[in-house]
């Protein structure tokens, strides 16, 4: 997992893999934070953005999730969001397996998760081994948020690793 803030991006950009840089730069270059909710292609079949406007809910109402084919960049535009995070392990109990069709699995609650607080301009990168529970309320108060989720296909990582 990576946690960052776009206000520091120029100083830190050299520390991120190329696919992460491309995803973060697409948020700015394509003005995704200003767009309506929906899906936007960045690199056909390999990277796309989901602009979302959910309402946060209590962590008990949300589910842990993970992906096998995509890395997520979750960038917060408006509001405050808590994301619970833990490392994938065989002890996690899958409640819904949609990995083959929709690239996600949902899990029962698990012990040992950490809280990550996102404020506008901040982002988190979740790899396949980072099980995460997004859109959790902060301080017991549900609120509308706006976020951009960049989905980066693992092929971009495999190609970068082969170079």
Image: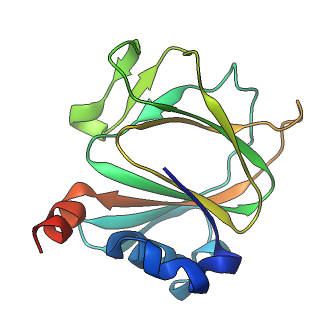
Q: How is the image coloured?
A: rainbow
Position of 21 relative to 86 (above/below) = below
Q: Position of residue 71 (x, y in %)?
A: 37, 53
Q: Is residue 12 left or right of residue 81?
A: left
Measured as percent of width and height from the top left, residue 75 is found at 61, 62
Locate residue 17 relative to residue 84 in the image: left or right. left
Left or right: residue 152 compared with residue 158: right
Identify the residue at image location x=71%, y=69%: 121
For the point 54% across and 16% down, the residue is 110
Inspect this view and state whether residue 22 appears. Answer: yes
Q: Residue furthest left?
A: 162
Quadrant location of the C terminus in the rendered image? bottom left
Q: Quadrant of residue 99?
A: top left
Q: Is residue 75 visible?
A: no
Q: Foreground: 122 or 29?
A: 122
- Taking the spot 58% from the left edge, 86% from the top edge, the residue there is 10
- Where residue 154 appears, as percent x and y from the top left, is 24, 56
Residue 114: image x %, image y %?
64, 32
Query: As drawn, is 34 to the left or to the right of 112?
Result: right
Residue 47 found in image quarter: bottom left
Q: Is residue 108 above or below residue 133?
A: above
Q: Which residue: 58% across, 15% down?
A: 111
| Number of numbered discs overlaid on the protein picture | 0
């Amino acid at each position: 997992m990576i946690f960052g803030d776009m206000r520091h991006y120029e100083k830190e950009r050299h520390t991120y893999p190329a696919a992460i840089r491309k995803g973060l730069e697409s948020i700015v270059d394509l003005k995704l934070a200003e767009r309506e909710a929906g899906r936007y292609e960045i690199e056909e079949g390999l990277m796309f953005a989901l602009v979302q406007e959910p309402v946060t809910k209590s962590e008990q109402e949300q589910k842990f999730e993970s992906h096998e084919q995509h890395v997520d960049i979750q960038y917060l535009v408006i509001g405050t969001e808590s994301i619970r995070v833990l490392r994938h392990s065989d002890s996690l109990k899958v409640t819904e397996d949609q990995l083959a069709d929709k690239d996600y699995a949902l899990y029962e609650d698990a012990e040992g998760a950490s809280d990550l607080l996102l404020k506008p301009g901040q982002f988190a990168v979740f790899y396949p081994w980072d099980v995460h529970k997004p859109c959790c309320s902060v301080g017991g108060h549900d609120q509308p948020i706006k976020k951009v989720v960049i989905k980066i296909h693992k092929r971009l990582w495999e190609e970068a690793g082969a170079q």
